[in-house]
Image (cartoon, rainbow, N blue to C red):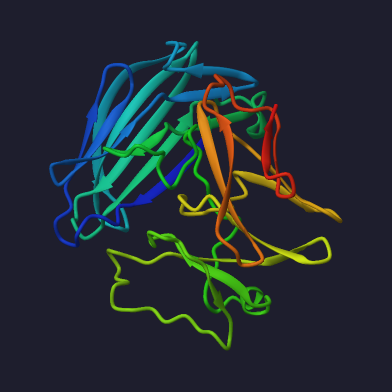
Amino acid sequence: MKFLIFLFLIFAVDKGVGNFVVNVVTDGSYSITVNGNIWLTSGYTFFNNNGKKYSTADYSLKLSRSWSTSGRDIIGEWQSTNFDYLAASLPVTTTIKTYNDPDIPIAIFTQEDMVRTPKVYIDKVRCQRETISPENSSTDAACCDAGGQILQPSKPATAIDDQIKKLPPSVIYSAASTTKTPVVFSDTDPLYLGPECTSVNFCLYYTSPILPLGDRNKVILLGETGKWVPLSVKRFSYIRRTMGDIVLTLQVSAHEIVIFSYMVDFGPVQTILCDNSQGSLPAFVSTISILQKQCTIV
């Protein structure tokens, strides 16, 4: 039995007024309504087992039933909506769990394959969540790529993390800023947070190291500024600096455009597009060259 668990904190829900409703469609997709408004809608669900893909898009993954449960744990009273799928003869269950207390605005997503045999190993079974996009949004969710994979950091960073404090002065910018203009951030140029940063309307900042390019230029990698984690290890698997270039290896999903931002010598923000919007499959290899200002997709 294998599990894949995601947790979403619904920041847009004001404390004390949360109300989750999960609406299920017969094809296995669903939407989540918060306080009477659609918060997100799902796309296709797929499940990979030993190299074979089962998807609701081509009906190789089929919804057999949906049902509800409720209970109590150490957090509080909860309710869940459960989806039973069949990938050929392989049973797969997806669960969306929310809490009745409006002061706990979280949704927990779990995907589980029910195989109980030592012949199926964890490195050969991969569950992937649905493509999750905020309702009425023209872009993919800031948390995920177009395939539904969460673009997570390699580790959480805190203000007291010694590894963070020991880094050299960097560039910092705000994801909430409409201009996303970077500013120098160091011991001599501290960052002051104003009253506009609250627990509901939170402010999100990122730091980026300054990398030398050749003998004269300095490059600042900003990444996907539209994502909560702009340089996620789930997107960018490798960053290599040569004598005259900086090359990034990244993963681009099917029907996806990745917009990568960077700066040279504190000049204007520049972008490079990795366009796989016409591809029906994820790109096999994708690389970004800062020197050539282009993305190559194979």
- Residue at the (58%, 70%) spot, across then down: 171
Residue 156, compared with residue 61, is above or below; it is below
Q: Nearer the viewer, residue 199 or 193?
A: 193
Q: Residue furthest bottom?
A: 188
Asked whether residue 93 appears in the rendered view, the answer is: yes
Q: On the picture, is 179 further left or further right than 232?
A: left
Considering only vertical position in the picture, is 253 above or below 204?
above
Q: Position of residue 291 (x, y in %)?
A: 74, 49
Residue 2 visible from this viewpoint: no
Q: What residue is shown at x 38% (from left), y 40% (from top)? A: 109
Camera-side residue of 238 and 170: 170
Residue 282's image quarter? Answer: top right
Image quadrant containing the C terminus = top right
Name the foreground residue: 241 vs 128: 241
Task: Tell me which residue sits at (32%, 72%) in the image.
Answer: 197
Q: On the picture, is 215 further left or further right than 91?
A: right
Position in image of residue 270 (x %, y %): 58, 52
Find residue 120 and report its image quarter: top right
- Residue 280 location, quadrant: top right
Picture residue at 84% right of the left edge, 53% below the top: 242
Residue 168 in picture, x, y percent from top left: 68, 77
Q: Position of residue 41 (x, y in %)?
A: 30, 33
